[in-house]
Structures are given as C-alpha cells and as structure tokens.
Image (cartoon, rainbow, N blue to C red):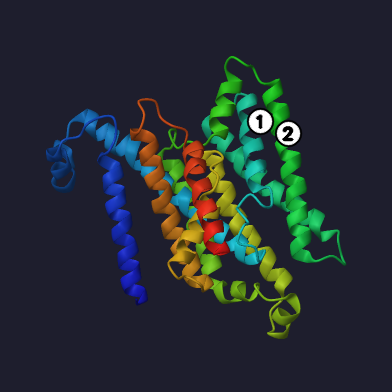
Amino acid sequence: MSKPIKALLYGAVIVVTALCALFLGRYPIPFSEIIKVLTNPAEMEKTTRIILFTVRLPRIVAALFVGAALAGSGAVYQTVFKNPMVSPSVLGASSGAAFGAALGLLLGFGPYMVQLMSFLSGLAAVFMALGVSAMGKQMNKVLLLVLAGMLVSTFFTALISLVKFLADPQNTLPAITYWLMGSLADSDLKRGLFIGGTVILSGIILYLLRWRISLLSLSDEEVRSMGVDPASIRLVVVIAATLMTSAAVSISGVIGWVGLVVPHMVRLRGANRFSSLLVGTLFGGGVYLLLIDTLCRVITPVEFPLGILTSLIGAPFFAFFLLRRRK
C-alpha cells in the first residue's frame, strides 16, 4: 500500500472514530443535531453546543495526542533499548511526572501549574537517569540507561508515597489518587494544543532521524562503522520521546500499557521498519486511547478511570502476545 493511501486511510479512521466519540455519551444527542453540526452549528441548542465543543471535543483532541505520545514513545524506546518489552516509563518519565503533579496538588496549585510541574518533573527524572548512566564509562550504555531508569523511577515512586502520606486524607489525597489512576475528564483546548504541539514537534524530529534510529538496533561498533555516532543519536531520540511522555502524563495522569501494547499491535500488522512502526504507532495510539476513553465515558454511570481500563485490556493482550511468540 502506498504512503498517500495509508495517510488517507489513517485520516479516515481518525475522523470516523472522533465523530463517534463526539456524539456518544450519557447526554443523548439526536441525529438531527449531527446534521446541524455538519451544516449550521449556530442553530444548535446551547446545551448541546457546550457539551460537544467545550466538553467532548477538547477531550477527543487530548485523547488522540496523548495516545499518540505514549504509543510513539513506546515504539522509540523499544527500538533504542533493543527490547520489545520496554515501555515509556523505562527512564522514569512517568513516575517523575506523577510526582510533579502530586506535589502540585499537595501545595494547592491550580490545574495549569500542576501540569507544568508534572511536565518539568518528568523531564528532570529522565535527565537524572541520563546523568547517572553517564557515570559508567566501561559498562554497556543501553543496559546502564535501563538500570539508571529503574533507580530514578524507584526514587520518584518513593517520593509519591511520601506526598500521599503528607496529604490531607479528606481532600488532597483522593485528588492525588484519582489523578494517578489516569483521566482526561479535565481536558480543555489549551491542554490539548499543548500536548499536540509537543507530539508534532517530537514526531517530526524522530521521523527525520528514522533511518539513524533504525541503526540503533545494531551494535554500537556497527553503527560507528556507518559514520553515525550512536551516543548522540540515542540522546536526541530519548529526549524527543521523553518530551512526548512527560507532556502526555502531565495532562492525563499515569496511563499504563498503551506504549507497550500499541507498538506490538502495529508490528502484528507487518510494520517491521522503524519508519512504518513510528507512523503506525502515532496514529494507532491516538485511535486506541480515544476508543478506550469513549468506553470509560459510556460503560458506567460514573466515569471509569482511564488507567484502570487500559490495564485491564492491556494485560490480557500482552499475555496473548507472549503465547503467540512462544508458538
């Protein structure tokens, strides 16, 4: 299938999924309102307009970009670390961003300040992991990065526990706990544009470096023999993927399994080259998370936490993948 046809197919799937998500929910919207949206939005009822364009549309935008960020960064990390079991949390970005948000909630900051603290804390966690890994001169660089990421992730997880221990159990602690379970209920257009700009910028950088990233699946000696410095490429790629992960976690909370499950789904469709894998995971991750978020809104009277549902779906799929690989 040619690239233009693939692009049209991806776009059509996103449009159809977004339209379904726009009109599905606990507030019923008749088919006549759908016609008004497509023909003359000014004639819609005020309540319907608020629900569609103030509540649901920003949430759809956020779900598309958060899913793309988590899935795309997962594919990148799996390639860089030569391990299909790696997820975006491998270098501590998720736990660092979660700590920043928890600390912001503990201090009583507003939603935008909490998002900023989460984003910066996620970046700080990864730079800490990079700093720790730089101390080892003779060890395998990939292995050292993974070990440093585990160390930093454990450290920030302990800090999250400390923040929860200090939080007011009546008000602040429930807010922190709910945020850590993952949700897009508080999304607005500004947050959606923030994550969208980060994903687009990082995605362009990664796509421009796609053939160099593909070389990282080889040994460092083989990469150097082709005139590419693996350490420099690895650093740029990790920073770009971390930007996406931190931005996603800062507005959605901790949502697991997306960065692990979606790349394997795309590989099952035959995307073996990194360029195809990257594009497939960016689009597929957005659609996947939008579908999951729509389910969270409609399956129960009270909204289901997004992180719980992604785990309930992701764990059985991962078991299926392991059994398939075994066969």
Please indicate whether residue 89 sits to the left or right of residue 62 in the image: right
* Residue 176 percent across, percent down from the top left: 59, 27
Instruction: Kindly identify which residue carries mark 1.
Output: 103
| Residue 312 can be seen, yes or no | yes
SS class of the residue under badge 2? helix
* Mark number displayed over residue 185: none
The image position of residue 12, as x and y in percent, is: 28, 60
Tag 1 near tag 2, CB within 8 Å: yes
Asked whether residue 72 is in view, the answer is no
Between 192 and 12, the one lying in front of the other is 12
Q: Is residue 234 left or right of residue 311?
A: right
The quadrant in which the C terminus is found is bottom right
Q: Quadrant of residue 227?
A: bottom right
Sequence-wise, which precedes: disc 1 or disc 2? 1
Mark 1 and mark 2: Cα distance apart in space: 9 Å
Label 1, residues with CA under 10 Å away: few <14, some 14-19, many ≥20: many
* Residue at far front of view: 327
Quadrant in which residue 28 is drawn = top left
Q: Which residue is mark 2?
A: 159
Residue at 43 percent of width and 33 percent of height: 185
Check disc 2 and give the amino acid type.
Leu
The spot of residue 288 in percent (x, y) is: 41, 51
Q: Is residue 42 left or right of residue 74?
A: left
Which residue does the image show at 47% across and 50% down from the upper left?
67
Mark 1: which amino acid? Leu
Residue 209, percent across and down?
Answer: 57, 72
